[in-house]
Amino acid sequence: MRLAFFGDVHGNLEALNAVLEDIQRRGVDEIFCLGDLVGYGPDPEAVVQLIREKNIKTIMGNYDDAVGYSKESCGCSYSPGRETEVGDISLNWSIERTSEETKEFLRSLPKRMSFEVEGVKFLLVHGSPFNELLEYVKPDTPSERLKEIASKVEESVIVNGHTHLPMARWVLGKLILNPGSAGRPKDGDPRASYMIVDVKSGVISFETIRVVYDVKTTVEKIAKKGLPIELATVLALGQTFDMGPGKVTFTLK
C-alpha cells in the first residue's frame, strides 16, 4: 500500500491543487489530511469544497475547530504582538467567509484517526495523542517527551501536523512522522510539502515530497482580498519571522 499524508493547507488552494496533482502522478492508494484546512490563506471555502469533492479522509486541526465553532482564537502559542494580531485577523476573516455548510463539515471532523495497513497500525492526530489540536511535536522536541508519547499509544506509526515542519523520528521502536505543511511551510523552503509512506509486508519506507506551486497567484489573492501582507511574506519565504511594525518588506514581481 502506498499512502499519502498532507496537512496544514490553510486556505491555500494553489498549493493544495499542486499537491493533489503530484499525488495522483505517483499512484497512491489512500490519501489522508492532517487538518488545518482553513485560516491564514485566501481560499478557505474552496479548499474545504475540494477536500470534500475528493472525499479525502481528514482529521480536525485547531483552525478547523476555531472556524467551525466561530471561536475568537485558534489556541496557538503565538508570541505577543503583531504575529498574534495577524493570526486573529486571518481567523476572523476566514470565519466570515466560510458557509454554514463548511463550518458544519469542519465541526464533524474527528480529532484522531486510527487504522491498520498490512499489519502496521497508524495513528493520525493534528497535534499529539495527548492534546490532539494544540501540542507541538517538533523535530527538536526533547527525547523524553517523544518517548512518553510513543509509550502511551498502541500504534506503531504516529503521523501529526501543526508544526509546519517535516519530521521523522524513531522512538522506542515506533515512528513519529510529520509531512510538513502543504500550504504554509515554515522550514525555509516555500514549496508545498507532503509525505508518501509505503507499507509492504509490514516494512515501512517514507519520503518527504516538495512541490512547486503558483505562489504568486496566492500572494496576489492575499493582497486583493485585504488580508495582512505578512501572510504573503511567510509564503514567499517559507518561514516565520519577526512580524513587528516596520519589519516587513515584500514586492510582487
Image (cartoon, grey):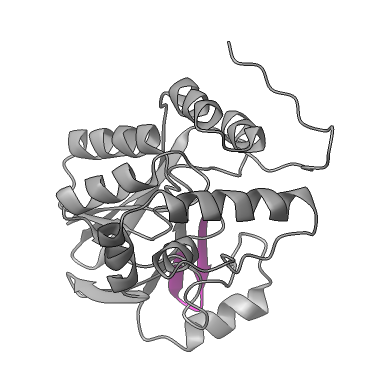
Position of residue 107 relative to residue 218, above or below, is: below
User: Does the stretch in magenta take in 175?
Assistant: yes
Q: Which residues are magenta?
A: 167-176
Asked where in the image residue 214 lies, by quadrant, the reply is: top left
Asked where in the image residue 84 lies, by quadrant, the reply is: bottom right
Percent of width and height locating residue 160? 45, 65
Q: Nearer the viewer, residue 197 or 56?
A: 56
Q: As drawn, is 66 to the left or to the right of 43?
A: right
Percent of width and height locating residue 253? 58, 10
Percent of width and height locating residue 144? 66, 80
User: Does the stretch in magenta take in 164?
Assistant: no
Q: Is residue 192 visible?
A: yes
Position of residue 234 relative to residue 86, above or below, is: above
Q: Residue at x 19, y 38 (%)?
A: 24
How many labels were placed on the picture? Answer: 0
Position of residue 217 relative to residue 73, above or below, is: above
Residue placed farthest to the bottom in the image? Answer: 152
Q: Residue at x 24, y 33 (%)?
A: 21
Position of residue 6 relative to residue 199, above or below, is: above
Percent of width and height locating residue 44? 39, 47
Q: Main secondary structure of the magenta part?
A: strand
Q: Nearer the viewer, residue 212 or 207?
A: 212
